[in-house]
Amino acid sequence: MFIVLAVILLGALGFFLVQGTKILPKDKREQYLSQRDPDDLPGGGVDTLEAPTEDGTGLGEPELGGGVDVAEPPVLEPSVDTPEPVAGRLARLRARLVKSNNIFGKSLLALLSRDEIDEDVWEEIEEILLMADLGTDPTMELVDKLRARVKVEGTKDPALVKQMLTEELTALVDPTLDRRLTVTADGRPAVMMVVGVNGVGKTTTVGKLARMLVAEDKDVLLGAADTFRAAAAEQLSTWGHRVGVPTVKSDVEGADPASVAFEAVDKGIELETDVVLIDTAGRLQNKSNLMDELGKVKRVVEKKSAVDEVLLVLDATTGQNGLNQAKVFAEVVNVTGIVLTKLDGTARGGIVVAIQRQLGVPVKLIGLGEGPDDLAPFDAAEFVAALLEDR
Ligand code: GDP
């Protein structure tokens, strides 16, 4: 049994490939540069392939896909992008948030600044909050708070009304939540898994996040464990390559994602990277398959290293659908943070509150565009200020 396993694993050595230039040891890099024919690449760029073993966790040996397919040689042009600094990103992207969401803020401010706020006006306020996807409970809470404050403080002074709304909305978004990403671990790479259904912007987010980490001087390695979408691994390694970050991937479509993830962590440990970032597949069509697969990826990775972050990517434009997805993923893996994408294209900023309530997990990052650096750390106060900006 072990001999058969060893033969299969040796055969599989050929189709894992580490791409990139930045953190490869110098001797290996020179080897790559002198051996650009894929057949000459030593072990397809991976020295050893330790497979997860059967140990009663219900995980068999990783299925390593069909025949061995040697991936294309690493592209080694030295030119790499310099990602934008992380500090100040939300401020830089603020205009996009203002543009897409401030109709919400403007309408609320206009209604709350009326001399007389009767029941019809309160109903309108409620409607606006619900339309922004704030969720029923937070909407009721906010309206109750505002009613109480309006009674005492009045509505004459628009600046005061704005301050009132700012304070109450910020409290709902919760500035006290710890939104930092775990990017360091003791004596090993920090391991982050990025999960979410297809189309939400998951692979793009992994690429943008890699750039953020590089901007913070982290050595990063990407694992392309979305082996079901044909172009995903290619898309990811292109992102990585632009900032000199290597990608572990399999060129065999449908290869076992857990194996690729395991290999990525293994390689990250070997190369002593700071962070290993793993992209995963997200087919929600078959919920139980997704659960099995994602759970397996995490458990297999955990044979090698703890998983420090599981980031769930949700598309802000999908409203209730996003909430349902969040529920499914939270059942499978212990989500540690939310990335809300496409906030530049929707007036449903209230989803930040709804999603945090639903999962009890903070929104850590927001996507505000398709550009490579259009991902920003989330900040409650800045977010609310942008929603209420009168422009
Ligand atoms: P995946 O299937 O979840 O991996 O999705 P992709 O990463 O391939 O992204 C799907 C589409 O969403 C792409 O066209 C991305 O450029 C786009 N996208 C991702 N994030 C954002 C964002 O924050 N804003 C906008 N406007 N588009 C985004």
Image (spheres, rainbow, N blue to C red):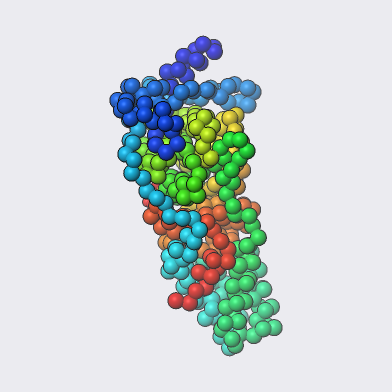
Residue 15 position by quadrant:
top left
Give the residue at the far left of this rendering: 37
388 horizontally vs 143: left or right: left
The picture places residue 159, in percent across and down from the top left corner, at 57, 82
Nearest the camera: 186 or 2?
Answer: 186
Number of numbered discs: 0
Q: Is residue 260 above or below residue 351?
A: above
The picture places residue 220, in percent across and down from the top left corner, at 48, 41
The picture places residue 184, in percent across and down from the top left corner, at 59, 43
The picture places residue 203, in percent across and down from the top left corner, at 43, 45
Write the residue at 46% across / 23% down. Answer: 47
Write the residue at 38% across / 55% down. Answer: 371
Residue 119 position by quadrant:
bottom right
Write the residue at 40% across / 41% down. Answer: 244
Q: Is residue 182 above or below residue 347?
A: above
Q: Is residue 42 visible?
A: yes
Write the residue at 58% across / 59% down. Answer: 354
Q: Is residue 299 visible?
A: no
In the rendered image, which quarter contains the C terminus? bottom left
Nearest the camera: 244 or 292?
Answer: 244
In the rendered image, which quarter contains the N terminus? top right
Q: Is residue 133 above or below residue 155?
A: above
